[in-house]
Image: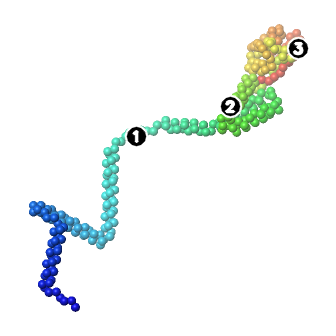
Amino acid sequence: MAKKKSKTQKYKQNIKKKAKRLQQNAQNTQILPKEKQKNIEPILENTTKKTKKEVISNEKVNQKIKHNPQKKIIVSNWKKILKEFQNKFSNKNNKENEIELPKFKKTQTNSKKNIFLRLLYELKTNIHIIFSAILILTFIILLIGLIRINVLETGKIIYICCIILFLMIIAISYNKYPSGKIFTIFLCIGMFFAIYKMQYTYDFIRNLNSKVYEYKTYYVVTFDNVSNRSIYSLNNKNIGLLKDNCINIERKLNTKLDKVDYIEYDDINVLFYDFYNQKFRAILVNENQYKYLQNNIENNKKVKILYEFKANAKK
């Protein structure tokens, strides 16, 4: 068993412990002058009092929150509401400070320009379709003209159409390339030239209006003698006709004759009178006029038809 310490021993130990504490405090703290110590002491007292109060208040709040966990949620919600309010308030102030620029109405010019540019782009991308459509339309017009003029036989018309269709297939298949487009242009130029010649000579476009126009039969009539054997004997000669018949007859007859002078008349009786007096070599008449001429021949002179053809005229 350990012996109990006496009172003197305990007293000596307490004195030693106090001495050690005093030595440690002297090492940690710096000795200040008396004037500074007097100034610092009230500041330290105030700070210590404040810190003690804050610690006590925080401890009380924490104890309340621990006892009531719902208050935690309420406090966090209030903090969020305050932050949102502050953000809104700051945004409003910023908006008020911002300069409001005048809002210009969008003009229709931009939309029109966009539509125009889109159309140009589509035309550029689909230009080969336009070339093919023009080629097909010109061929259809040419085919109508060949059928309506009643000059060529059906076998010749089929032969011409087969050749053109073969060339058209080649052109359409290569229309996406520049060489194909150039080839279609040459084909269209050739067909347009043929359409122009048929229209100039036979006037087939106006004849499509069948209510107003029709093809009538015309005759080249001369006296029945040795000098008038064929239509080619009228080259470089004068031919008389009525103004009503001069629309397409002259052009049609010029396909057969060369250097012919046409003398136009308003009255049919004057035309027949000059014909009987041989002021010109032949006359151009339609079916009814030819019958009228046969019934009114002077001095029993015989007449004959050198050439017969059809031309477009009003009904």
Q: Position of residue 62 (x, y in %)?
A: 28, 69
Relative to 12, is 260 on the left or the right?
A: right
Relative to 233, is 90 on the left or the right?
A: left
User: What kind of residue is marked 2?
Assistant: Ile
**Classed neighbour count for the residue bearing mark 2: other residues with Cα under 10 Å, few (<14), some (14–19), many (≥20):** some
Q: Is residue 285 visible?
A: no
At a point 75% along the width and 36% down the height, the residue shown is 166
- The residue indicated by pointer 3 is 224
260 or 210, which is in the foreground?
Answer: 260
Q: Mark 1 or mark 3: which is in front?
A: 1
At a point 77% along the width and 30% down the height, the residue shown is 146
**Classed neighbour count for the residue bearing mark 3: other residues with Cα under 10 Å, few (<14), some (14–19), many (≥20):** some
Vertical placement of residue 65 versus 112, above or below: below
- The residue indicated by pointer 1 is 103
- Mark 2 lies on a secondary structure that is helix
Q: Position of residue 96 (x, y in %)?
A: 32, 46
Counting residues from the start of the chain, the first of labels 2 and 3 encountered is 2
Q: Mark 2 or mark 3: which is in front?
A: 2
- The residue indicated by pointer 2 is 185
At a point 80% along the width and 17% down the height, the residue shown is 257
User: Which quadrant would residue 103 be assigned to in this image?
Assistant: top left
At a point 16% along the width and 77% down the height, the residue shown is 17
Counting residues from the start of the chain, the first of labels 2 and 1 encountered is 1
- Mark 1 lies on a secondary structure that is loop
